[in-house]
Amino acid sequence: MAEITGPFPLPGYVIDLAAIAAAEGHAQAAGEAATSAAIAKEETEGLVVLAQKAVEDAAVAAGNSPFPTYAEALEAPKPAPLTKIEAVVSGRLVCWTRQAGGPCLGGGWVPAGDATPEHFGAPGDGVADDTGAFQAAVDIGRRIIGRPGAVYRINGTVIIPDDRDIDLNGARLMRGGLAPWMVETSKARTTWDNTNITLRNWWCEDDATEATRGAFNLLVCDNLRVMGYKVLTRSPYTGSKSAWSCYISGKNILIDDIDVDSTAAGLWSDGLHFGYVENLVIGKHTIRAGDDAIAFHHVPANYPWVGRNLPSKNIVVQPGFVSSEEAHGIRVGAYSSAASAGGVAGQASNTWQNIKVVNEVFGRCKTAVTLIDNRPPGEITGQNDLVAIKGQCLHVDNALRVLYVQGNPDVAVAANRGQKNFGRVQIDLTASNGNLSTGSLVYAGGVDELVMTGDLTFYNAGGDAAQTHLLFYQIRRLVLDRLTTKGDTTGNIASYTYCDRIEVVDCEHLPDGLSEFRTHTIVLNADQPVSVLFRGGAIRETARAIGFSGAGRVMDFVVDDTLIQSSGSFPTSGTFSSVTWEAGGKVVCNPAGGLSCAVGDLPGASVPVAEGHRAYATNGRKSGEGVGAGSGQPVYRNGSVWRVLRDDSVVAF
């Protein structure tokens, strides 16, 4: 070991120079290592910063540049700084924003703005099943917007909850499966109390195959608005499965701008079908149906969407067009009696009140207007009441009817005459060129009060020329008011059976071709007296103008200022021969121009003609005329005989 001596260090200390040198080397190495570590740390931190910046740059790029497809947006990383994503889905730019718990893009995202099916990947190409995507959009958004031109194929059922506003916006819903309904409100099968649903530009159709036949819209909802409603049903009829455009029930409903075509679908393809409704307005519409065009009748009680057991009321149908290939233009009433298949037992309060149809145009229909409620007593509470329908029938042929009313199980059966399931009904129909080769133009009964007006023109084309064209049964008060009829028949124009009071006011009948047997036939019965009033109007070119059929009771018979032009006299000698007159009844035979008939045809002693009633006996003898050579005498009724006005002698011929 080398030593250093001198004044320093102190005596006794020895300095080891080799150890010092070694220590200095270690220190230098440690310093160099620290420096290297510091440099490495700095470099690492820089790389982290660069990496973070790259991520942020990628996020910005993703937010500002739409993904070209929904699939790419779904699969792309979505780091925390990213708050918005856009993608082009079937040509539509769709945007999402980040929100915890959101259902879109695998979770954590929601639509930016109104929800669309494209937010959930719906291609809307009419091929892929869009049921799930459409349902997801309906579930998340109060307002849902379709893509113009899209065809959303619905292979299942879309359920619509409360408080939704859905605008297809030029898109269509394509029925793609055999679900009973393509669209349902969420409580349609349970409590029937959905509220506040609006459907806009609601276009539905099927693909015209048997595999997609079924019904479209089951809408049971209060405060329902459907604006721009279009349905095209083309799937073929298979014998039972329905293809209704809709079944609608609830309060405060507006349906407007309607275009329905189910003509290719045959039976069970109603245009608009309503169960219980209150405060309903049907706006402008064109409905060409395979079955009923507009049906107001409840489904059987065993249907889960039967709805509330209450009277339907306050319904307005604004001007529009309806036609039906197989059934009725407008139908009002009940489904059937409980004794029939699928009856309505338990729905006794389901009646229709205050319905007004304004200026409807009827195209081809088997029956233009049908009012039918054939439930027996015990199955109905109250009446269908205040039904007013006005319209024009453009095409009536092949035994098709203008009006059919059945207000009890069978209006032709006398035992049912006490039941009137319809109260007050007013019908104003114009029909031209009705070919009545079989059947009748009007068949109506089971009504408290029926008022009918209009203009009916009909003809026979090789069928039964002797049929009766207007048949009325079991009506308490029947008023034909300013009704014009024109037709060729050798039968009766109108007949009245079990009608309590018949009023024919300012009506006119104009035969065309054949000469009918009788224009008006009143069928008598022993159980109920009938009152008959003809006032004004005209009955032209007939063999017999007015007459009775059968034997029975009459209260009043009044013909006042009605022009009668018949080949036979009026009245005939047998007009009143089978009548039993009620106490206090009266007879007034005062056609326009006065009563004029042969002496033998003047109402006999048993007919309660008013005292002093005047007539003209066409073969009454004047003084000096021989038996059978009378040239006519004015006469008047005195007691039970007719006397010559000039000298009070009993008229003779």
Image (cartoon, rainbow, N blue to C red):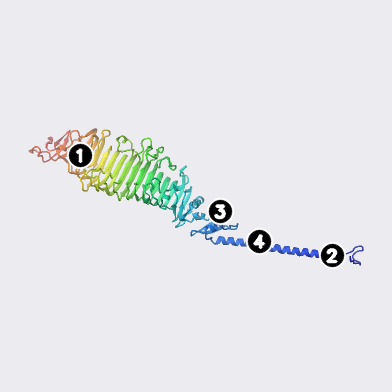
Q: Amino acid at mark 3?
A: Gly
Q: Amino acid at mark 1?
A: Cys
Camera-side mark, 3 or 4: 3
Q: Identify the residue under disc 3.
A: 106
Above or below: residue 350 compared with residue 64? above
Q: Identify the residue under disc 4.
A: 48
* Separation of residues labelled 1 and 3 (CA atoms): 89 Å
> Taking 541 as reference, is 245 left or right?
right
Q: Amino acid at mark 2?
A: Ile
Q: Is the C-beta separation of discs 4 and 1 under 8 Å?
A: no
* Separation of residues labelled 4 and 1 (CA atoms): 115 Å
Specify the label residue 608 is tagged with.
none
Determine the secondary structure under disc 1.
strand
Q: Where, quadrant-wise, is the N terminus in this rendering? A: bottom right
* Separation of residues labelled 1 and 2 (CA atoms): 157 Å
Q: Where, quadrant-wise, is the C terminus in this rendering? A: top left
Residue 428 seen anywhere in this rendered image of the structure: yes
Determine the secondary structure under disc 3.
loop
Q: Amino acid at mark 4?
A: Val
Location of residue 565 by image quarter: top left
Q: Identify the residue under disc 1.
A: 589
Badge 2 local density, few (<14 within 10 Å), some, or many (20+)?
few
Say which residue appears at 72% left-offset and 63% top-offset: 38
